[in-house]
Structures are given as C-alpha cells and as structure tokens.
Image (spheres, rainbow, N blue to C red):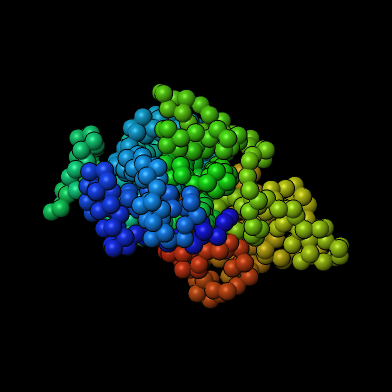
C-alpha cells in the first residue's frame, strides 16, 4: 500500500469546502450547498487519492490547472450523491432473493443476518438496508438483522448516528415506508427506533484497514457501491479481495450498478436477478488466482469474526525444535494467515500435544473451526481457551456472538460481561496480540453495545 493513501487527510475543513464549492460554481454553474458537503468530500478524496496527493490543498492546485481533471471531478460528483434506496432494484433483489436464499441454506442454529455498508456517508444506505431486511420479515422468521455502516468521515458518521434528514431526502421513499420507518421532527424526519436499533456506525478507512469484520463477524451481505471507482487498480483489487474473504460462503457483494469486477476479481459468481447483477461468494470457496499486490504480514486477528484473515506471504519455516510448543504455535499462525488451514491444524495439534493448556493455540483452533462452519467445535475450543486463560477476552467475545446467533441470550450476556471484566483486569494480556491493529477502546465499545442489545432482545434490560 502506498504511503500517500494512508496519509491523505480524512475530513474536508470548512475553509476547503467553501473554496471547492466556489470554484465548482464558477466553472459549472452548479451550486453545492452545505447539505452536499459529504458527497463533495467523498468525490474530492477519491480523486486526490488517485493522483497520490497528501492533502486536498494539493489536489485543489491540480484542479485549477487541469480542465480534464475538473471534468472528471464533475462526473464523480454527479454519480456520488447519496440517498435512501438509491438504485431500488438492488434493494428489491436483497429482499426477494438474497435474504430468502441465505436463510434457506444456513444452519438453523445461526439466527443473525449481518450486513456491512462500506462507505456509508451520512447513513441513508445502511438505514435503507435495515428497512429492507425488516420488510423481508427477518424478525418473524426467527432471525435478527445487524447492519454496520462505516465511513472515513467522522462528521458524516455523526449525522448518520443522529438519523435526522430534511424533507427533500425522503422524496423518493415510498409513502408507506415513510409512515412505518420515519417520524416527523421540527427539522425533517427521524429514523424510528426499530430501524436505528438494527444499525451501528463506526469509523473505517477501506484503504488503511483493519476491517470491521475482525470485530463483527463474517458478513452475509456487503454493500460497497461507488466507493472504489477512482481508486488505483491495485488498491481496488486489495479492497475487493478483502471483502471476499470477509463474506460468508454464499454471501453477496453489492457494487454500484455501473461498476464491474472484470479485471478486479474472478473469485465471485455473478448472477442476474431482475436485471440486477449480484456477486456471490461460492459456497465452497477456495483461494483462486486473483490479481493482487502483496500485503504486509499481520497476525491472525478476530473477535467477533468467524474467520482467520489471509495474507499474501509465505509461512515461516517449520519448527526446528519438535518439543517446542511455542514454535509450533508460531508456525500454525503463519499457515493460518496464509490460508493453509490443514497445515495450521497439524501444527496446532502438535503444539497442544506438548502443552494442552496453550490458550492461544485453542483460540486459533476455534477460529479455524468457525471458518469451516463447525460451530459446535468452535464453541468447545473457545471454552477450552477460557478454561486455560479466563482473561482471554476475544474467546469470551466469540462465545457471546455464537450464543447470540443461536438465540441463547442469557448465555451470550454472561460471555459479554466476562469479556468486559477480562478487559478491565487484563487490558494487555496475551490475547491482545490478536487484535490486529484495533484499539482496545473499540473492543470495549463493541462489547458494551453487544451486551446492551443482547439484554434488550433477551428481556433482561
């Protein structure tokens, strides 16, 4: 990953926004008021990233000097406007096809339906997803919906969390949905609590990572629409590859209706539903040849994730000392990170033969079982993990998520409470090496929110 992508400033200052709006108005006649700040910000950042600029001020200099670039920016601004139920056919495909297919083919023990809206801006997309899932009858079918919206702008996320929108934002929303899912306020309309309870918002930079699946579990559906259209091709490939790995087998990626994965990834199955092209992760997904740029190595990390992240590096050399459990554990982590789970299982088995109380080995073994869909085995290993180290926060968190997905809310609440207790007692314990770059504060917030939701669903709160 190039350095300029990681250093580009995240937000548009008031002074910068005014300067860009004045220039655009002067040269196109289009006036972008304050309500368009977030769509303007997204457009400017994607174009500036394409040229490797480290600041939006540098990009402004290019914009003034290059008429062709000004036209490219205007093209992007006109297609990057966010709204409720943008491209309605995609939401209809989600409601009538994707949700029924996933629920019909998944284990009855798994009762959650997780969707991630990547690049959610001011929240219209994730709220639209939540309304669609509720319309699909998720609750009546014995499941519960979870939607995560992420964005690189803290200002956009603040507006999304507020969930209040001016009247013009609802012009294209059917009246029956307005009546069911919005309530009038002094300044517009507020998304109702049943929808807001389904949606969470969090800061996330797709280019930098780590991705939220390391805390939120594998995803049934990911929306990433018109987010990467002006990324450099290698960055887009890395992002799409990462999204593929974070989908459950049989899960779906929704991209912009005018976007394509041609030349980006050949790992998805592309199908057509009602004139909408959908991209599905095969149910027996294997690592395929895919154009990509090698990523820096990082340790396998997961909390709510039924997965082990993949990295494009070679595993370490085999353990030189057959009786060294720690060496076998290091090899197992390297193999797991590289996607070679058979080799990882072999090394974990050897490490646990030498030291059955090795909590980290138990934890990785639990992750691999989750990855393969062996939830009973995963629960057993996570229980053995906390048996060896009761302060292993991530094992408690995974147990909480698994119980919650099965509708076992009392057990889930106990595990979330145990995770918070362990965080307080052992904030820098051995478990922390599996955080994969996340700050402990994010983990604390995740545990507290999960506990609160679990208590309300289970009738304890």
Along the line of sight, which residue is nearer the eye, 420 or 40?
40
* Residue 27 location (% of width, % of height): 27, 46
* Residue 17 location (% of width, % of height): 29, 57
Q: For the image shown, how many numbered marks are present on the structure?
A: 0
Would you place residue 248 above or below residue 6 in this image?
above
Left or right: where 159 falls relative to 8: left
From the image, which quarter does the C terminus lie in?
A: bottom left
Along the line of sight, which residue is nearer the eye, 367 or 333?
333
* Residue 106 location (% of width, % of height): 53, 37
Q: Residue furthest left?
A: 186
Q: Residue furthest bottom?
A: 425
Residue at the image position 49 percent from the left and 33 percent from the top: 260
Residue at the image position 67 percent from the left and 40 percent from the top: 287
Query: Does residue 204 show up?
Result: yes
Along the line of sight, which residue is nearer the eye, 52 or 374?
52
From the image, which quarter does the N terminus lie in?
A: bottom right
Residue at the image position 50 percent from the left and 68 percent from the top: 440
Residue at the image position 42 percent from the left and 59 percent from the top: 58
Left or right: where 287 falls relative to 215: right
* Residue 425 location (% of width, % of height): 53, 76
Query: Does residue 192 show up?
Result: no
Left or right: where 422 falls relative to 357: left
Along the line of sight, which residue is nearer the eye, 326 or 210?
210
The quarter of the displayed image where residue 227 is located: top left
């Amino acid at each position: 990953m190039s350095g300029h992508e990681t250093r580009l400033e995240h937000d548009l200052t008031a002074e910068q926004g005014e300067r860009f709006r004045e220039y655009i108005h002067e040269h196109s006649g289009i006036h972008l008021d304050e309500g368009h700040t977030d769509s303007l910000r997204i457009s400017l950042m994607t174009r500036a990233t394409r040229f490797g600029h480290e600041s939006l001020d540098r990009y402004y200099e290019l914009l003034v000097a290059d008429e062709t670039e000004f036209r490219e920016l205007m093209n992007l601004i006109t297609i990057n406007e966010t709204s409720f139920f943008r491209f309605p056919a995609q939401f209809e495909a989600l409601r009538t096809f994707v949700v029924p297919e996933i629920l019909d083919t998944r284990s009855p023990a798994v009762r959650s339906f997780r969707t991630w809206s990547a690049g959610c801006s001011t929240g219209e997309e994730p709220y639209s997803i939540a309304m669609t899932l509720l319309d699909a009858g998720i609750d009546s079918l014995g499941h519960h919906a979870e939607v995560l919206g992420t964005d690189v702008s803290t200002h956009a996320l603040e507006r999304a969390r507020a969930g209040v929108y001016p009247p013009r934002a609802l012009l294209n929303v059917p009246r029956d949905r307005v009546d069911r899912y919005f309530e009038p306020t002094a300044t517009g309309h507020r998304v109702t609590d049943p929808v807001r309870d389904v949606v969470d918002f969090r800061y996330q930079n797709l280019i930098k990572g780590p991705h939220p699946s390391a805390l939120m579990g594998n995803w049934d559906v990911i929306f990433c629409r018109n987010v990467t259209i002006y990324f450099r091709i290698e960055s887009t490939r890395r992002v799409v590859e990462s999204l593929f790995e974070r989908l459950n087998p049989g899960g779906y990626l929704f991209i912009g209706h005018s976007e394509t994965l041609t030349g980006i990834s050949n790992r998805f199955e592309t199908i057509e539903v009602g004139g909408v092209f959908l991209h599905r992760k095969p149910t027996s997904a294997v690592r395929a040849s895919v154009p990509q740029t090698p990523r820096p190595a990082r340790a396998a990390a997961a909390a709510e994730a039924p997965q082990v992240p993949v990295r494009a590096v070679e595993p370490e050399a085999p353990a030189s000392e057959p009786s060294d459990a720690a060496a076998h554990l290091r090899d197992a982590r390297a193999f797991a990170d590289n996607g070679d789970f058979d080799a990882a299982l072999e090394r974990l088995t050897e490490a646990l033969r030498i030291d059955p109380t090795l909590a980290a080995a138990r934890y990785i073994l639990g992750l691999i079982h989750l990855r393969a869909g062996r939830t009973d085995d995963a629960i057993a290993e996570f229980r053995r993990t906390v048996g060896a180290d009761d302060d292993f926060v991530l094992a408690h968190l995974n147990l909480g998520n698994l119980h919650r997905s099965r509708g076992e809310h009392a057990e889930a609440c106990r595990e979330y409470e145990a995770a918070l207790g362990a965080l307080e007692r052992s904030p820098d314990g051995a478990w922390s090496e599996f955080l994969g770059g996340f700050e402990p504060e994010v983990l604390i917030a995740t545990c507290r929110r999960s506990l609160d939701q679990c208590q309300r669903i289970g009738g304890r709160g």
